[in-house]
Image: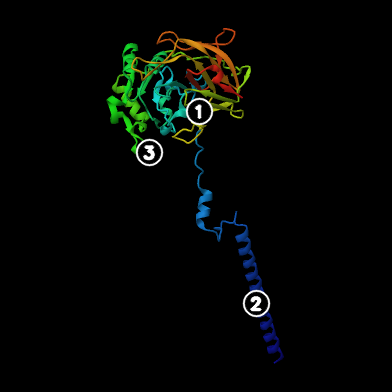
Amino acid sequence: MAQRKKRKRKVAKGRVVAAIVLALVGILLILLGTWALLRPEGTGLIPFSWEDTTSQTSQTEVAPPEQEVQPQPVLAVNPLTGTQTLAQEMVNTRPVAFMINNARAALPHNGIANFDVVYELPVEGASTRLMALTADYRQAPRYGSLRSARHDFVELAAAADAVLVHWGGSDFAYNAISRYGVNHLDGMTYGERYFITDRSLGRALEHTRFIEPDGLSQGLAAVSANLTQEGYPSLFAFNQAGNTTGDITANQVTVPATGEITATFTYDPDKGQYAKGEFGSTETDGNTGETVYVDNAFVLYTSVSLMEDGVHKDVGLSSGSGYYISKGTAQSISWSKGNAGDRLTFTDASGRELLVNPGKSWIIFTGSSPSRTQFS
């Protein structure tokens, strides 16, 4: 009997030990599982993550190769400005000159901020008109509004060997185009084929004529106007140091261009340029709304007389006095041109060739007295 009780106690004791061993094994397995979750590497187990599997995939994706940095285009010197801003494909290319409407009702001008040289001359009545030159006509989306040519502008276009873009012209202008052999594209001839009439502007019809680069390119081909010319020369003798200054303070310049039209040039020392103004306000470009700035301004005094028809004006282009304005200063100069195909030349007060600072230029011919030009 006593032996049976001993055996029962041994059996019970063995069961307790077995239960303890099983419990220890269970605890060990739990610990191993926890360790595997926290330190999966080297275990051969697949790690578990509560994160979105897409993030895991994105971390293992091969990064795209770095894009090659495109080299900046090498620009050439623009012969109209003396600045290194001209696209290589436009080197040895003749400029294009646009006859631009300067009536108050035609403002703002489109593309005026993209021109390299602008000529402003008196025309009939008390108005002025502009002829604007660019070495790369692709720079603006639209040019205008365009107006008719006058014979004085034709002579200046011939001197620059430019192709003249216009909408009509006086009889004197058409005679000059023929006489001087000036290549030209006339809206009166080609109308809507290459030009645009924008009636949405709500202006009088004569203030709605424009041209865009694609139409201009097609028009130039249609009139066989070849722009290529090897070694196209500059219009100015440039001072590449850009430090030509005068002895007159010229932060604000007021020029009576005609009896009714006054041009202004307001110097911005931060930009080192002049904001061009007319009709009592600063000029803006109709394409961008931005202020029109120039680096140089020329005020050239000359004779202005009526032609034999009693309507159109003849602006003397032989020689005269004037001012060169740049860098917040002005200086007295002399100018001359000579024949129709001759270029304008400028000399300083000592008689030496004037060195012009690189940049955009605005040239005004006026019959007013030099004493009426104001500097401050």
Which label sits in the foreground, 2 or 3? 3
The numbered dot on residue 123 is none
Q: Tell me the residue that label 3 is attached to.
A: 201
Q: Tell me the residue that label 1 is attached to.
A: 72
Pick whichever of labels 2 and 1 is earlier in the sequence. Answer: 2
Q: Quadrant of the C terminus?
A: top right
Is the residue marked by circle 2 packed among few (<14), some (14-19), or many (20+) residues within 10 Å?
few
Q: Secondary structure at mark 2?
A: helix
Pick whichever of labels 2 and 3 is earlier in the sequence. Answer: 2
Q: Amino acid at mark 2?
A: Ala
**Residue 58 placed where, x, y %?**
51, 50
Furthest-bottom residue in this view: 1
Q: Amino acid at mark 3?
A: Leu
Is the residue marked by circle 3 packed among few (<14), some (14-19), or many (20+) residues within 10 Å?
few
Q: Is residue 77 visible?
A: no
Q: Tell me the residue that label 2 is attached to.
A: 19
Q: Nearer the viewer, residue 25 or 355?
A: 355
Q: Nearer the viewer, residue 181 or 4?
A: 181
Separation (CA) of disc 2 from disc 1: 81 Å
Which label sits in the foreground, 2 or 1? 1
Is the residue marked by circle 1 packed among few (<14), some (14-19), or many (20+) residues within 10 Å?
few
